[in-house]
Image (cartoon, rainbow, N blue to C red):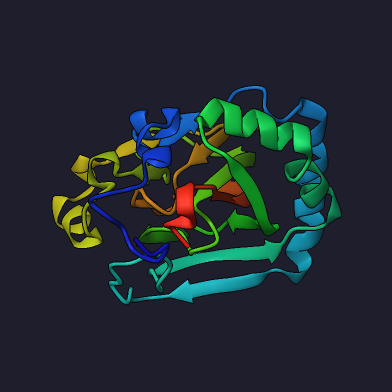
Amino acid sequence: MSRDLYSHELPIEITASRIYSNGGILNISGLIADGAVDELETEALSARSVGRRNALAVSDAAEGRGGNPDRAFTSAHAREMHWQLFSAPALVASLSRKCGLAATPTGGGSYSYYEQAGDFLGLHRDIVTCDLTLITCLRETGAGAGRGALLVYSRHMTEPLARARAAGRAAATQAAIGRGETVALLGGVVPHEVTAMHPGQERIISVMCYRIAVTGDSLA
């Protein structure tokens, strides 16, 4: 399989992993210390001044990874503190052990700001350099039932995105992430989206991508 497409025959390294058996997502408590969360939030707030607004009204309906999902939010490149934290050998080893996968950090990471009413990210799979995605919530205000949230389509990990779209949100599981909490997501495999923020709701997250090692690099 190419890394840019879903597959009915995923590598055994993925299908035998703990995160895959848990529906492509794992809550990982205690991975990031409270002090580090504070530092990440400070860095994210500083980076927001040079952030870029991402807005696309209509998705390209791509079936593979990446593509151009419909969206509306602000993003910014992460800085040195983010890279030092999420590329640290001890953290990478802990993440790999908890997920049951061999992971290697890729890229410098980013911050996403869902700060306006209606901000969202449409249904997609992550880009080819982001097999495993680590998401840490740095700020969450106005959260609650029926509010904007991360939805994960675990039953569609080996199916085209079109089937997840057709199934609708009733087929998804909501992943609640409060401030300081971290989730690992098989972002290149499991379809996911962020539903629209409500008035008064704000969420800032850090995002770090990792490549999964597989035999023969069949995902390359």
Residue 118 seen in render: no
Q: Nearer the viewer, residue 117 or 45?
A: 45
Quarter placement of the N terminus: bottom left
Q: Nearer the viewer, residue 87 or 196?
A: 87
Residue 9 seen in render: yes
Q: Nearer the viewer, residue 18 or 26?
A: 18
Identify the residue at horizontal 47%, vertical 54% (top origin).
216
**Quarter of the image where one finds residue 3:** bottom left
Reply above or below: 25 against 73. Answer: above
Identify the residue at horizontal 38%, vertical 69% (top origin).
70
Q: Position of residue 41 (x, y in %)?
A: 76, 44
Q: Position of residue 90 (x, y in %)?
A: 76, 31
Q: Is residue 69 left or right of residue 108?
A: left
Outermost residue to the front: 216
Identify the residue at horizontal 43%, vertical 67% (top origin).
66
The number of discs equals: 0
Q: Position of residue 210 (x, y in %)?
A: 59, 50
Identify the residue at horizontal 77%, vertical 27% (top origin).
34
Q: Is residue 63 left or right of residue 125?
A: left
Q: Position of residue 60 (x, y in %)?
A: 32, 77
Q: Nearer the viewer, residue 130 or 140?
A: 130
